[in-house]
Image (cartoon, helix red, strand yellow):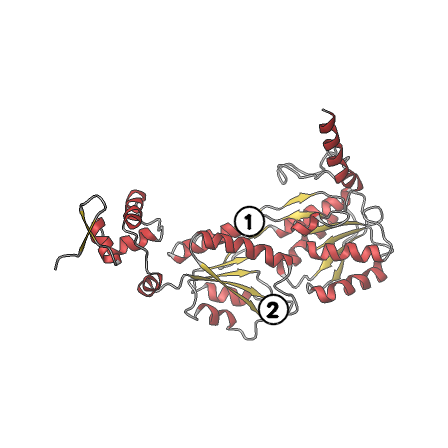
Amino acid sequence: MAMPVTEHPRGKPETRVRTIVDLARVAGVSAGTVSRALADSPLVNPGTRARIQALATRHDFRLNQMASRLRTKRTGVIGVVVPLGHERRQHLSDPFFMLMLGHLGDALTEIGYDLMLSRVIPDAPDWLERIVDSGMLDGVLLLGQSDQRDAIERVAERYLPLVVWGDLAEGQVHCSVGTDNFRGGRLAGEHLLSTGATRIAFLGDVRAPEFGLRFAGLSAATAAAGAAPPVLLETHLAADVMYAEIGAHLDKHGAVIDGIFAGSDVIAMMTLRALADHGIRVPEAVRVVGYDDLPLARQTVPRITTVRQDFAGGAKAMVDRLLARMIGDAMPSLKLPPSLVIRGSSDAAVEAGNALSRPAPFDRADNDALPVEPGPQASLRRSRSGLKR
């Protein structure tokens, strides 16, 4: 049976393209090749892919996404799951989660996938099995390992499209992307010691594996320096109780502590407030270092010295690995290097803008370009000098 034709604007008859089969016939390829080309699949030769996409544009053809998903048994949806076995009161509004969700959402949108978000309080050993077997998702990204490593390992044995934001443990099965938390904790400890701190406390919940490794890194730094071991002050990650707990710790230990490593920037921010309420000056009496380098770390007074994680790069690496695993390529885990950003919460000279020439007490192999941010006074001086010119 002949295909219907329509008049081309220049008078030449042209095949009417209504289905993917019609477009495949015009292109001289299979319907499967057309489907993959329109989905920007790397499995199609770039030249062929460009030619098919140009033909689709010329014929004003748009792929029926629902039909395509039924045919390929794909949903076009990626699950982003936040497991909170270690802290049931922590909210998705936590700035760390919001920042990671933003980067993951951007990365998934660029490749045409929708995001389904789920905050999970693990209520049974098979909670993750229920998610991956739901038939609703093409793959799963976990934001954190929480205290659920055994459940994650069990599912990863049989379910390939699973990638986790978290630390890499020796011999683990699941694919993870995350910062070297032990090294980050050691950087924080080395910096606090270099500022003259001799009695350092760690604020955080070491039941979360990332926090446990940060505390271990801090402990290694103090041991290597022959300093007193750090004091572990357990602090919940839920904002509604965090401030009260930090205040109670300061009531008990504030007179002897001269350095604090907060396990996250949110904890560091609450610590600055609690120290101010106790009349303890930062950094003159107590130096404070956070972890993450969230945008809020630059908005406090003083600004927070912190260990920076590459969230944008980490989110992209997670999505890249997930896509590879969705087509059967078991890409390996990735451990990202941390870096230290020195600000006013640990060094008054930085806040005053006088620390640009201050030598960094770190090995360049660990921090190729150690960020030292000038304070507002330095920026003002530069602005005024520019006006004089």
Q: Is residue 3 visible?
A: yes
75 relative position to 31: left or right: right
Name the outermost residue toward the left.
Answer: 1
Residue 252 locus on image (x, y percent): 85, 62
Residue 66 locus on image (x, y percent): 35, 64
**Which numbered mark, 2 or 1, is in the foreground of this view?**
1
**Amino acid found under the numbered disc labelled 1:** Ala
Between disc 2 and disc 1, whose residue precedes? 2
The residue that appears at 69% across and 65% down in the rendered structure is 238
Q: In the picture, residue 95 is in which quadrant? A: bottom right
**Amino acid found under the numbered disc labelled 2:** Gly
Residue 52 locus on image (x, y percent): 28, 48
162 relative position to 270: left or right: left
The residues bearing labels 2 and 1 have C-alpha atoms spaced at a distance of: 25 Å
38 relative position to 10: left or right: right
Q: In the picture, residue 68 is in which quadrant? A: bottom left
Q: Nearer the viewer, residue 163 or 116?
A: 116
The residue that appears at 28% across and 45% down in the rendered structure is 51
Residue 315 locus on image (x, y percent): 53, 52
Identify the residue under disc 2: 85
Dot 2: what SS?
Answer: loop
Q: Which mark is residue 312?
A: 1
The residue that appears at 51% across and 56% down in the rendered structure is 105
Dot 1: what SS?
Answer: helix
Q: Nearer the viewer, residue 51 or 370?
A: 51
